[in-house]
Image (spheres, rainbow, N blue to C red):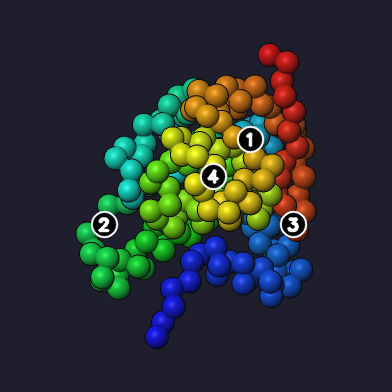
Amino acid sequence: MKTETSIADAFAKWVAVASKEDRQQFCDNANSYSDMLRGHSEKSPKKPVLYTSGSIEYAEDPFWWRKKIKKAVGKKYTVIIPRSMTSKYKKDDPRYRTWVKKTFVMPDFNEISACDCFFIQICKTTFKGMGTPSELSFAAWLGKPIVAWIDGVKLNDMPGWTLGCLDGAKLCSSLEEAIDHYKKLSLVEHWFRSPKTLRPGWTVSEE
């Protein structure tokens, strides 16, 4: 009998056995991808990448708040908005699993690896799927600066694992509070790059 393994579990198992060299290579690849996302070159300044995580498959409108963030801070950040989960395959079709992996799982993990800011909406539909919790776990392991919008749910009702991943994160009670936080936050010119974390240095602007 086959047992389903979550993406986060599978990644955790890889981390446990991966050599230091493999982890370093993973981070080096993510750094290169990060520069590509920013459009960074010798002549252009670096632009921080902000990844927006939240329920897509089970949300009524998963894009309205993402578009609001992009409109508010798009000049300062490269805002990553994941794709819509619309497939011609049914879920019991093996091709559906392949499509999800190629279209969402791997691209999203690449973008999270490369991002400088990880924003997550946690609402009633978050835990209906595995995508958002897996992304949060991955971002926490990478040491990304996490900002979480706690949207209509109580901390006491959240899984312990989720709360552990939110340790050190900034928790916001509204989208406006989160946007205001990003407006005040400025990225220093240098980035700390080590095998354990891709966390950049942060400063709060005086503006």
- Categorize mark 2 by other alpha carbons within 10 Å: few (<14), some (14-19), many (20+): few
Front tag of 2 and 4: 4
Mark 4 lies on a secondary structure that is: helix
- Categorize mark 3 by other alpha carbons within 10 Å: few (<14), some (14-19), many (20+): few
User: Dot 1 corresponds to which residue?
Assistant: 170
The residue located at (48%, 71%) in the rendering is 5
For the residues labelled 4 and 1, say whether their Cβ atoms are less than 8 Å apart.
no
The residue located at (22%, 59%) in the rendering is 88
Label whose residue precedes the other's in the sequence (4 or 1): 4
Mark 3 lies on a secondary structure that is: loop
For the residues labelled 3 and 2, say whether their Cβ atoms are less than 8 Å apart.
no
Q: How far apart are marks 2 and 4 (CA)?
A: 35 Å
User: Dot 3 corresponds to which residue?
Assistant: 196
Query: Label 3 amino acid?
Result: Lys
Label whose residue precedes the other's in the sequence (3 or 1): 1
Query: Label 4 amino acid?
Result: Asn
Query: Label 1 amino acid?
Result: Lys
Label whose residue precedes the other's in the sequence (4 or 3): 4
Q: How far apart are marks 4 and 1 (CA)?
A: 17 Å
Q: Which quadrant would the N terminus be assigned to in this image?
A: bottom left
Q: Where is residue 203 in the image (x, y as percent from the top left)?
A: 75, 28
Front tag of 4 and 3: 4
User: Dot 4 corresponds to which residue?
Assistant: 156
Query: Label 2 amino acid?
Result: Ser
Front tag of 4 and 1: 4
User: Dot 2 corresponds to which residue?
Assistant: 87
Label whose residue precedes the other's in the sequence (2 or 4): 2
In front here: 120 or 103? 120
For the residues labelled 3 and 1, say whether their Cβ atoms are less than 8 Å apart.
no
Q: Where is residue 172 in the image (x, y as percent from the top left)?
A: 56, 31
